[in-house]
Amino acid sequence: MRTSLLFTCFLLLGALCTAQELTGPNRIPPGTLASFEITPAQEASWHIVMPSGGTYQVDTGLSKLYFASPERGEYTVIAGIVNDGKPQLLVKTFINGEEGIEPIPIPLPPVSSLEAWIKMQLPVLVKSKNLAAETQLVADCFEQIVQRIETENIKTVQNGQTQLQIALTGTLALASPTAVTDWMPFLTELSRQIEKELGEKVNDINTMKTVIQNVGDAMKSFELPGNVSILPRVDDPNVRSQGTQNRIFRNLLTK
């Protein structure tokens, strides 16, 4: 597999599942009910990356998710499952909007650097009540990789990717029962931003060190805006601290 493809997914905290499938519509009219399910049926920990408002509910068997929103846009459904004793992800993106009508873009401030992107997207994509504290823990993971590259304990980009994934997974699993799921959407998008920063130097360990250092520095200096309140949604299945699926993920990731 090409290294550039590896960088797209190395922050996903688990390999994408091939045995199971996440099925559902590719496009729905706004305001209508849509269902997404795991086939063959299996319990999952669900999350939706939303451009704006919307609601979703998981059935009692945890293998289906129901969604509806009047807001047009692109939505991404993420299902975390356990396959062969390992945590894995299934992802499906769909459009909430009529055929022939482009989704209404959400205006965002211009992003001039990776640091600006990180500070803008952290409070948007990370659904955690402990965002500030967990951000510092994640920043430490990036700094650890930089130090290992400088001491030549890490000599290749591939090894750096692996070590970073291990550090992030272990740190977040210990931070809280829901931290891995809370951070998954942000880390998924961050991996794409890192790949853009690397460009044609995707195999260069020194370039990787510089980019990883920039990520860590941006997180270290991150502060929550005074008017931002990070609270869990009552309909978010990831908030269930005693949920069976979250316990499975926590136990697996801390072994």
Image (cartoon, grey):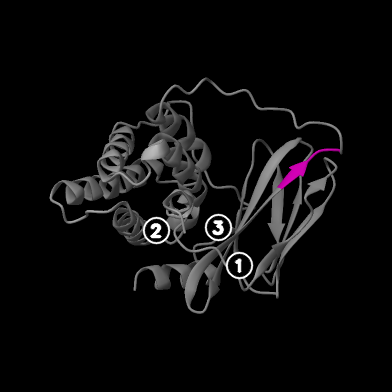
Splitting the image into 4 quarters, where does residue 91 fall? bottom right
Question: Residue 156 placed where, x, y %?
Answer: 27, 54
Task: Determine crowd level at label 3: few under 14, some 14-19, many 20+ residues with C-alpha closer than 10 A.
Answer: many
Residue corresponding to mark 2: 176
Does 79 sit left or right of 61 as displayed? left
C-alpha gap between disc 3 and disc 1: 10 Å
Q: Which of marks 1 and 2 precedes in the sequence? A: 1
Q: Are marks 3 and 1 in contact (CB under 8 Å)?
A: no
Identify the residue shown where x is 83% and y is 51%. 33
Number of callouts: 3
- Residue 243 visible from this viewpoint: no
Residue 157 in the image: above or below residue 229: below
Structural crowding at the residue carrying mark 2, measured as other residues with C-alpha within 10 Å and reported as few (<14), some (14–19) or many (≥20):
some
Q: Percent from the top left, x then y, of residue 102?
A: 79, 31
Residue 93: % across, % down: 68, 49
Q: Is 214 situated left or right of 20 in this image? A: left
Circle 3 sits on which residue? 238
First-in-chain label (3 vs 1): 1
Q: What residue type is labelled 3?
A: Asn
Magenta region: 94-98
Estimate the spatial distance between the alpha carbons at disc 2 and disc 1, rounded to whole Å.
Answer: 18 Å
Closer to us: 63 or 203: 203
- Residue 97 on the magenta span: yes
- Label at residue 44: 1
Q: In terms of sequence position, does the residue under pointer 3 or pointer 2 come before the other?
A: 2
- For the residue labelled by badge 3, is the local secondary structure a helix, a strand or a loop? helix
Residue 222 vs residue 103: left or right? left
